[in-house]
Structure formats: structure tokens, C-alpha cells
């Protein structure tokens, strides 16, 4: 018999003697903190200097000479009548926001429970079970935020919006998992998900998540909306031609670089634990990195949104979602790099499974980071337009 006691069997993995691994994690934390400090400095400069000057200029009572000159104003104040105009495809946007809030809550709660020691690597499958159950029960948050967003757009088809919230993205993930499982079945692998387990997950989805989504939507539609600081005009304002560096495609791609840069070192260890059967147990580090990711997504989106509004472009809804959400594109590209450099998979089926699961992971990462950018932008725009006097 082994001299190691049963209660101490995981100490070799959970001890802090592996200094090299800890040093890499601390390097990741310091790297992420430097990004946050840089972004915080930019946001502070915008809020304390540029934005303060804007508000002082917009709220100042013009003199008689300035009235006679009829000097035309420029900047973000000019779009006050359009900044809250509903975006294109408002229902899809509301569904994305609702599911994003659900995924973000699931990820944050699971990492927090793991960091506090409730989820141990000794309990196999506990992490996946907690993710699954939290996603099901957070259907109420999905319905609530989807309903609030769709109501803000004066949407009338609330039943269709709630049903899409409950079925669209979860259905896409389940469909991908089913196809990947068929591939595993066709190969005769024992790692395929049993049919009974798939039926159980579908039962949880339709019996718990879907009803909770409708319950959350009921409360979301029932609650009154906060009054918007400015009124939306009937006729949309013409958007002037934007310089090349404010192109939507360019700003969206640039916006995803820093959030990905804050997590890519930790991502290496997570991918190694998934695909190379290594143990991942430093959930305290992961919680810190996730908090830094939230701050980075919020700040980079606010900065780019301010520059966009200064160019008198008020189409910020989808861009706020895609700016921070584009970090998922870099995650998927990094997974391609990881596959070609770290994994030795010769079979075509193995490659299909790898990229299928990484697509699902990237989609969930897009939803979680995208909703952070949207909430940050909405808060920022509401605050600045509530502070300015509109004639």
C-alpha cells in the first residue's frame, strides 16, 4: 500500500512547489495588469481632460458675439438625437445580449466557486457539471436582459424574441456537439457521450432553462425602463464620411487585441489541460485574469466608442458588442497555432473534433466578452449625454 494518505493524494498537484509554473502565471498576471494600467490611463485622460472640456464647451452659455457668428458645433453632442436609435436587427441583438449575460454569469460563478475550493480536480466532472447546471439556472438572467434590451428598442414581438433567446445559441452549441458526437460514434470510440446523457441534458434544457428564460423575460418586460437622457429624433442624421482609421472593421479588429493579450498566457495552460491531459488547478490566478479581462474589455470599448461618437457616427450598438467580442477571433486563431505547434494529431477525425470544440469555446468567449463591451458602452453613453444640456 502507498504511504500517502487518501486525503493527501492531490498534494503533489496542488502544492506550490512548482516554482516555474507559478512564475509563468505571475508573469501572466503582471502582463495583464500592465495592459489594464495603460488602458485605465487612456480612459482617465479621456474622462478627466477631453470629456471635461467637451462638457464645459457644450454647457457654456454662448455670448452675443458667438450667437451672431452662429458657430457650428462639432463632436459627439450633435448625435444626441440619434445615439439611442435602435440598431439593425434589434431582436438578434437582444438575443445575443441575453445569452451573453448568461454565459458571462456562468463563467464568473464557476471560476469563483473553483477559486474558493468548492470544485476540486479530485472530483472528476465536477467542473463540467457545475458549468452545465449554472448555465441552465441562469436562463432567468438570459431572458431578463434580452427582454430589457428588446423593450428599449420598442420591440413588439416579445414572444418570438424570448423563444429565440432560449433556443438560438444553446441550440447552435447543442447541434455542434451532436455532430461531433456522431463523428466519435462513427469511429467507434468509447469517449462518445452516451445517448442517455444527451437525453438528460436536453431534458434539463427544455424543462429548466427554457421555462426560466420565459420567467426572466416576464420580469424584464414588466419592469419599467429607465428614462433615456435624450430623445430620439424622427429623421436619422446623416453620418459624415469617416477617416480610414475609424473604419468599423479596423476598430473591431483592433479592439480585440488587448483583451486577448490579457489572457493568452493563461489560455495556454487551459488548452494544455484540455488536450494534453495536464492538471489545471490554479483557479485563483484564473479568477484574477478573468477580472482583468472584464476591465480590459470595458475600457477598450469605451475608448473606441468615444472616438466613434466624436466622428458623429452613432451606430454604436453592434460595434460595442463586436469590438470586445472580436477577441474570440484571436482565440480561435491562437488555437490554430496551438494545434500546429503543440499537438501531434495525424487523424482527420481528431482535427475535426479539435476545431469543432474550439469553435464552441470561441463562440462562448465571444458572447461573454461582447456583452461586457455593450454594458460598458451603454453606461458610458448614458452618463455623458445625461451631463450635457440639449437645446
Image: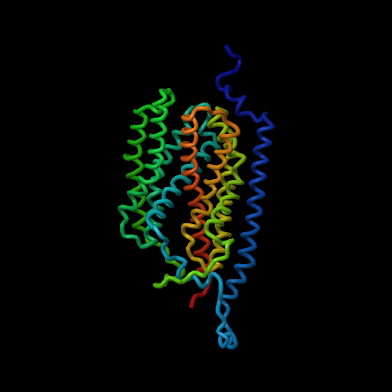
Q: Position of residue 126 (x, y in %)?
A: 47, 31
Q: Look at the image and name its color scheme.
A: rainbow
Camera-nearest residue between 199 and 346? 346
Q: Position of residue 388 (x, y in %)?
A: 53, 72
Camera-nearest residue between 74 and 352? 352
- To which quarter of the image does residue 221 belong? bottom left
Residue most extreme to the top: 1
- To which quarter of the image does residue 212 belong? top left
Q: Position of residue 362 (x, y in %)?
A: 50, 43
Q: Point out the image quarter for the N terminus.
A: top right
- In the image, what residue occupies the spot 52% across and 50% down? 326
Q: Is residue 197 above or below residue 389?
A: above
- In the image, what residue occupies the spot 61% across and 46% down? 261
- In the image, what residue occupies the spot 51% across and 73% down? 78
Q: Position of residue 216 (x, y in %)?
A: 36, 50
Camera-nearest residue between 386 and 79? 79
Q: Is residue 119 above or below residue 77?
A: above
Count of numbered marks: 0
In this rendering, position of residue 251 left or right of residue 86:
right
Amino acid at each position: 500500500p502507498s504511504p500517502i494518505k487518501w486525503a493527501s493524494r492531490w498534494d503533489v498537484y496542488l502544492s506550490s512547489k512548482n516554482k516555474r509554473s507559478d512564475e509563468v502565471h505571475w508573469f501572466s498576471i503582471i502582463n495583464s495588469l500592465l495592459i489594464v494600467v495603460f488602458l485605465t490611463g487612456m480612459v482617465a485622460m479621456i474622462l478627466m481632460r477631453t470629456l471635461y472640456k467637451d462638457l464645459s464647451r457644450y454647457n457654456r452659455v454662448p455670448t452675443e458675439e458667438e450667437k451672431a457668428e452662429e458657430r457650428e458645433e462639432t463632436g459627439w453632442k450633435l448625435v444626441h438625437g440619434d445615439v439611442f436609435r435602435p440598431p439593425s436587427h434589434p431582436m438578434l441583438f437582444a438575443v445575443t445580449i441575453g445569452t451573453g449575460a448568461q454565459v458571462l454569469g456562468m463563467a464568473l460563478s464557476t471560476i469563483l466557486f473553483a477559486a474558493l475550493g468548492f470544485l476540486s480536480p479530485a472530483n472528476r466532472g465536477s467542473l463540467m457539471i457545475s458549468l452545465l447546471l449554472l448555465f441552465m439556472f441562469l436562463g432567468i438572467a438570459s431572458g431578463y436582459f434580452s427582454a430589457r434590451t428588446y423593450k428599449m428598442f420598442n420591440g413588439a414581438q416579445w414572444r418570438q424574441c424570448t423563444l429565440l433567446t432560449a433556443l438560438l445559441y444553446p441550440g447552435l452549441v447543442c447541434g455542434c456537439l451532436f455532430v461531433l458526437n456522431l463523428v466519435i460514434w462513427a469511429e467507434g470510440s468509447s469517449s462518445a457521450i452516451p445517448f442517455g446523457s444527451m437525453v438528460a441534458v436536453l431534458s434539463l434544457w427544455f424543462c429548466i432553462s427554457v421555462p426560466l428564460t420565459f420567467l426572466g423575460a416576464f420580469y424584464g418586460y414588466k419592469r419599467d425602463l429607465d428614462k433615456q437622457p435624450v430623445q430620439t429624433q424622427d429623421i436619422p442624421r446623416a453620418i459624415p464620411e469617416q477617416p480610414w482609421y475609424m473604419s468599423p472593421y479596423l476598430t473591431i479588429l483592433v479592439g480585440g487585441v488587448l483583451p486577448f493579450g490579457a489572457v493568452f498566457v493563461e489560455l495556454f495552460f487551459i488548452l494544455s489541460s484540455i488536450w494534453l491531459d495536464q492538471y489545471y488547478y490554479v483557479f485563483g490566478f484564473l479568477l484574477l485574469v478573468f477580472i482583468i479581462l472584464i476591465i480590459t474589455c470595458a475600457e477598450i470599448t469605451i475608448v473606441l466608442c468615444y472616438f466613434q461618437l466624436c466622428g458623429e457616427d452613432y451606430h454604436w450598438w453592434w460595434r460595442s458588442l463586436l469590438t470586445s467580442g472580436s477577441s474570440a477571433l484571436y482565440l480561435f486563431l491562437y488555437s490554430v497555432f496551438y494545434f500546429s505547434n503543440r499537438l501531434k494529431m495525424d487523424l482527420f477525425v481528431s482535427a475535426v473534433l479539435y476545431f469543432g470544440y474550439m469553435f464552441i469555446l470561441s463562440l462562448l468567449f465571444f458572447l461573454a466578452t461582447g456583452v461586457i463591451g455593450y454594458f460598458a458602452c451603454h453606461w458610458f453613453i448614458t452618463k455623458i449625454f445625461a451631463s450635457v444640456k440639449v437645446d
